[in-house]
Image: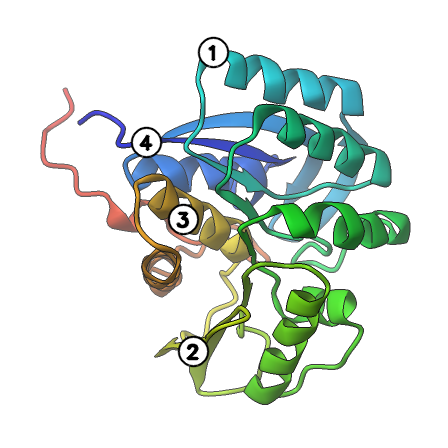
Amino acid sequence: MKPKSKVLIIAGSDSSGGAGIQADIKTVTSLGSYAMTAITAVTSQNTTGVRSIVAISPKEIRNQIEFTVKDIRPDTIKIGMLHSKEVILAVSKSLEKIKVRKLVLDPVMVAKGGTKLINNAAIIFLKKKLMKKTLLITPNIPEAEILSRMKINSTKDMIKAGKILINLGAKNVLIKGGHLKSKKMNDILVNKKIIKVFNSKKYNSKNTHGTGCTLSSAIATHLSCGKDLIKSCELGIKYVNEAIKSNLKLGKGNGPINHLNSVTINKKLN
């Protein structure tokens, strides 16, 4: 099959393959599109945690974005780990230059094992500079708490936090409900006109590393193929849930999800 669309991913690398650029490429590819990348940082990590983070210079990040797009123009851009104010400024300048409308921002702040992946100055800059430029921002509950400066203990709190982010300039906010202690999974999309709750079954598994990266990339892929925002969120959530359901059990800690759950091998490989 030929790729249906093109997606540029701006994010950090995860050496264990479960999150970051690696999860993004797997997601975009398994959903039938073509993935390009601009790497913002290189991490040494496995399922038990992060050992080290090496930043890529803002100039080199801009080079990756602009030189790639000059040759192959993406239909959608997914943005993940941006660890400093300088990186956010560089990415923001590149986005102004290349003018791609469909931008999905996953505000990656803390790794699954607890390691902080962004500094406080960068969080402030992300809210002021980048959030307003994106079509969709996809924070989990801890990230939404940081961005909205409120505690989230319920779906009502999720909606309230979403409205706060809309008032700060975000166009659409999808808050992921996986951190709430509930039997069902509730992900909530908020904008100025609607509040849409996506209900799904919650699978109890420690193997959920990379779910946030995967969801934002899945949504970006569906958007790149021409689907509307609500349908893209619905299909992205379904893809992630099926990937969690597979329960891969790789590694000794928070293992990855199964990005291949959507792929059917119909030819024997010799």
Give the side of residue 180 with respect to residue 57, left or right. Answer: left
Name the residue furthest left.
267
Residue shown at the point (52%, 66%) measured from the top left: 206
Element at label 3: helix
Q: Position of residue 155 (x, y in %)?
A: 55, 85
What residue type is disc 4 on?
Ser
* Quarter that holds the C terminus: top left
Q: Residues within 10 Å of mark 1 (few under 14, many from 20)?
A: few
Residue shown at the point (65%, 58%) measured from the top left: 112
What residue type is disc 2 on?
Val
Give the side of residue 16 with respect to residue 168, left or right. Answer: left
When the figure is inspected, residue 177 is found, relative to residue 173, above or below; the finding is below
Element at label 1: helix
Give the side of residue 225 with respect to residue 38, left or right. Answer: left
What residue type is disc 1 on?
Asp
| Of the image marks 1 and 3, the number of the one nearer the N terminus | 1
When the figure is inspected, residue 257 is found, relative to residue 264, above or below; the finding is below
Residue tagged 1: 71
Residue tagged 3: 218
Element at label 2: strand
| Of the image marks 2 and 4, the number of the one nearer the N terminus | 4
Q: Residues within 10 Å of mark 3 (few under 14, many from 20)?
A: many
| Of the image marks 4 and 3, the number of the one nearer the N terminus | 4
